[in-house]
Image (spheres, rainbow, N blue to C red):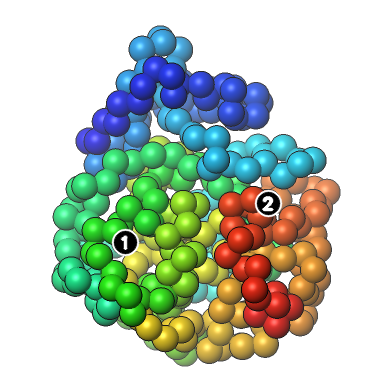
Amino acid sequence: MIIKTIKKSACKENEVTPEHIYHQRREFIASSAVGLAVSATSSSILLTGCDDAKSKNSLTTKKSDLSPPPSAQDTLTPYEDITRYNNFYEFGLDKSDPAKHAGNFPSKPWSVAIEGEVDNPGVLTLEDLLKPHSVEERIYRLRCVEAWSMVIPWNGFPLSDLIKRFSPNSNAKYVEFLTLYDTEQLPGQRRPYLDWPYREALTIAEAMNPLSFIATGLYGKNLLGQNGAPLRLVVPWKYGFKSIKSIVKIRFTSKQPRTSWFDKAPSEYGFYANVNPNVNHPRWSQRKERRIGEFRKRNTIMFNGYAEDVSHLYVDLDLTKLF
Ligand SMILES: Nc1nc2c(c(=O)[nH]1)N[C@H]1C(S)=C(S)[C@@H](COP(=O)(O)O)O[C@H]1N2
Ligand SMILES: [Mo]
């Protein structure tokens, strides 16, 4: 278990988290502290070293990790919804399929290949890949291209920390990610719905942005198969399909990689896929979204509310063309 010690001065969670979430989290932590202690592994949770009794065993969130939208409060989406309403087409097209069929995925030991324009390529076991990284919590909104959204307390570490270990060279302009290809464990891959394995990519600047995150858990528990175990990407200012699950390969390239959804329907799923209420999907509006668990629709916010952290990446792009 990785126990990251946070300085006392950093233990100001109640100042940076909306109050109802703070209390909700305290309740969650109180009711699950035993479970956390038992189930914790190096890839799951962060225990803080705050010596204030109330914040013992609490999970921390840094202020910059959650840029709240100006008018809306973010209540955490219940664990049951995050783990039962999923998109993971390798397990079926219905939202309930991944929870039904992901079962004990992955059954095998996991490894991740690092390839392409880097000084330190190689194949790492999951353990070696995760070992040097201390685990933290990030509460991020996830907004799907299908116009629903959730608020998820992820556990993991910044993608930039991982990338730095492999020393990309000056030709590395993009980072490509691939999901496992295994028609036994991922039976959806027997049908040609997408050109398997699932592929996604970011520019190197997007990948190095402090918001880009590798998740290994949520709500302090290891990821379940349906959420992309054992490790997945989380890119909170982009539509959910960019947040690729169950990664086995990370490739650094000089040219823009082709991605699965772009290949399937380039007019519907652009390479950038930034959350943008002003650019509609050809078949539906992107102005509003349904937060899972809520009745009334919310307005979708530019870059999913993370504009302060990412808009500088796109100043030279016409986002109506490069959607
Ligand atoms: N390998 C893989 N990754 C994937 C998908 C998928 O079908 N296969 N679906 C994407 C889509 S469309 C969304 S909205 C998010 C959903 O993540 P969640 O089920 O953990 O909420 O995963 C993304 N990552
Ligand atoms: Mo999605």
Q: Which residue type carries mark 2?
A: Gly
Q: Are marks 1 and 2 in contact (CB under 8 Å)?
A: no
Q: Position of residue 317 (x, y in %)?
A: 65, 75
| Label 1 Cα crowd, 10 Å radius (few <14 / some 14-19 / many 20+) | some
Q: Is residue 277 above or below residue 299?
A: below
Residue 225 horizontal/vertical position (percent): 38, 58
Judge whether residue 222 can be spotted in this image.
yes
- Per the image, the residue denoted by label 2 is 305
**Residue 108 is drawn in which quadrant?**
bottom left
Name the one closer to the observer, 101 or 69. 69
Residue at the location (80% across, 54% down)?
299
Check residue 138 in the rendering and tell me which mark sits there, or answer none: none
Among numbered discs 1 and 2, the one appearing first in the sequence: 1
Q: Is residue 206 left or right of residue 33?
A: right
Q: Look at the numbered disc 1 and give the secondary structure of its residue.
A: helix
Quadrant (top left/top right/bottom left/bottom right) for the N terminus: top left
Q: Would you name the residue on which mark 1 appears? A: 163
Which residue type carries mark 1? Ile
As displayed, is residue 289 above or below residue 270? above
Distance (Cα) linking label 1 and label 2:
25 Å
Comparing 102 with 200, the one in front is 200
Q: Give residue 214's position: percent from left, percent from top.
A: 39, 55
